Amino acid sequence: MLKQLPQPDIVRSVELLDHPSPWDLKKTYDNKYEFISRADGDITGRGRIRIYDSLSNDPVELQQTMSHEWAHLLEDGAAFRAFGYAAELERDGFFARRYARTNDHENWAVHLGERFLNAEGSVFAELPEKAPARTLVMAKALRNTLEERKDNLSPKQQEFLARIHAANRDLVNKVETMDATEFGAHSPEIHDESLALLLRRENTPDFIAANPRRVTDAERLLLDAAGEQLESL
């Protein structure tokens, strides 16, 4: 199962536990609904995944859980910081499930681990359309992760690369087919504009001037910050 992940080497240990997570009560209180953890990934750099007794033996659930926790292990550096800015731009947009709204960590793990890496192509395919700014960052982060591997490649390496290519192609096509009517003053499609500006950061002033929608100072700061993080990847 680990071999199906883009870079399984960052998982240094997997602990199988015969009890529930000690954090379930707190998360239930914080989220205001019953919360049962199947697993958790250590984001402190130790590369540890702990699996609790609530996780079933269903292979789909197991793979999705491992992909989710693997994504947590990838939360480091410029990619995750850029994702935070993209997430802020899309804060009123698409979330695959309620838990993804908890914080940037779960937003990242749900959409990268459970959606971008999902075995079903149709599940992945909705990301560029519904969460373009976050997808742009996730595709860049995943590509860099795959390029780090020189040996012991995942059998799904080519599939992951194809998804990165498809995501970037779809996002670029989306930008190129936009016209000014998509940027009305009250347009709810904030992710369309955030995507366009992230992709065309070098032409940001001209692009903003060519469209009627006013970009707020706060949005511009977020876009600049995300662009700087992407450029440093």
Image: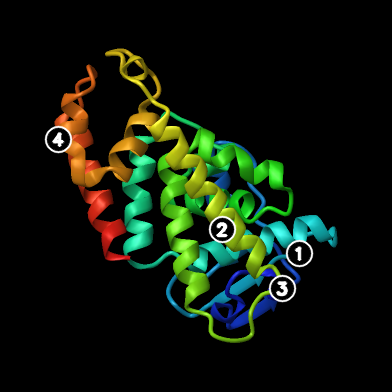
* Position of residue 142 measured from the top left corner of the image (x, y, whole percent): 50, 63
Q: Residues within 10 Å of mark 3 (few under 14, many from 20)?
A: few
Mark 3: amino acid: Pro
> How far apart, in angstroms, are the residues tagged by discs 3 and 2?
35 Å
Ranked by sequence position, the earlier of labels 3 and 1 is 1
- Residue tagged 4: 205
Which image quarter: residue 92?
Answer: top left
- Residue tagged 2: 23
Residue 103 in view: no
* Position of residue 65 measured from the top left corner of the image (x, y, whole percent): 68, 59
Mark 1: amino acid: Asp
Do the residues bearing badges 2 and 4 touch, measured as CB atoms within 8 Å? no
Residue 223 in view: yes
> How far apart, in angstroms, are the residues tagged by discs 4 and 1?
53 Å
> How far apart, in angstroms, are the residues tagged by discs 1 and 2?
14 Å
> How far apart, in angstroms, are the residues tagged by discs 3 and 4?
43 Å
Which element is circle 2 on?
A: loop
Ranked by sequence position, the earlier of labels 4 and 1 is 1
> How far apart, in angstroms, are the residues tagged by discs 2 and 4?
47 Å
